[in-house]
Amino acid sequence: MKEEIRQTSCENCVYRSWAFEKLTNEQLKEIDNSRKEYFYGKGEVVYREGDKVEKFLYLQKGLVKLLKTEKNEKEHIISIAKPLDFIGLLSIFSTQQYIYTITTVEDSIICEVDLSLIKKLIKENGDFALDFIEKMSKVFDDVIHTRLSISTKQLRGRIAYILLFFAEHIYGHNEYELPVSRKEIAQLIDMSTENVIRILSEFRKDNIITIEGKNITIHDTERLRRIYELG
């Protein structure tokens, strides 16, 4: 259940150097006084497609997914955001409503700041504005890179990409608990759930990975990488 918390001030937050390093002390106080910090349990909706864009969001802890529902009710996961990611930058200035739903994949902590304050600080502080634009560009680049990495690969290459993504970019370890279901993997890489299950089973039989429930252990990273690169 969504719960407002207060763990630390912006001044002492480890994320300051990454998110707000270009702000003056007075501007940082404005952020600190206006922001709200929320805990969301796994599987909770943060914002729904169609909700008004009024907040600047960044993820302190956990994982969230950006989910788009097509007219035929088919769901696609656009991306998965990890700690230190700004959430919602794909809509923050381009539209007044979210074009996707933001849902937690794990227990998560999210900071919210009024978008009107962020816009005010962008106008006041050119260094912050430039830094903000650079971070937005990186988000766009990452989404495009992910989509290209997926769309240009065959089925085995797509599954290899996802396994490496979680190992290298999310957990930093070859042994982890897969945070998404087989269905969600299918939504992320444009495959059927049946094909996801089949290829994971093939990787297990080939001794590339071990699967125990949701726990994944990658035994042969280089082979998995070759599968991804060759597609």
Image: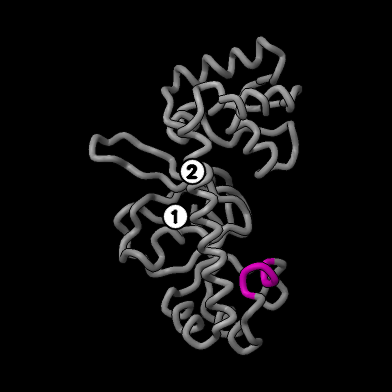
Where's residue 197, x and y in %? 52, 18
Identity of the amino acid at label 2? Gly
Q: Residue at x 52, y 69 (%)?
A: 133
Where's residue 105, x and y in %? 53, 43
Residue count near mark 2 (Cα–Cα under 10 Å), binned few <14, some 14–19, many ≥20: some
Q: Which mark is residue 93?
A: none
Residue 107 shown left or right of residue 71 in the figure: right
Q: Nearer the viewer, residue 124 or 15?
A: 124
Identity of the amino acid at label 1? Val
Q: Nearer the viewer, residue 143 or 229?
A: 229
Q: Secondary structure at mark 2?
A: loop
Q: Nearer the viewer, residue 123 or 193?
A: 123
Q: Is residue 82 magenta?
A: no
Q: Residue at x 37, y 50 (%)?
A: 100
Q: Where are the magenta residues, as a range?
A: 15-20
Q: Nearer the viewer, residue 8 or 29?
A: 29
Residue 81 shown left or right of residue 90 in the figure: right
Magenta stretch, overall SS: helix
Residue indicated by mark 2: 43
Residue indicated by mark 1: 46
The mark total stands at 2
Answer above or below: position of 199 versus 124.
above
Residue count near mark 1 (Cα–Cα under 10 Å), binned few <14, some 14–19, many ≥20: some
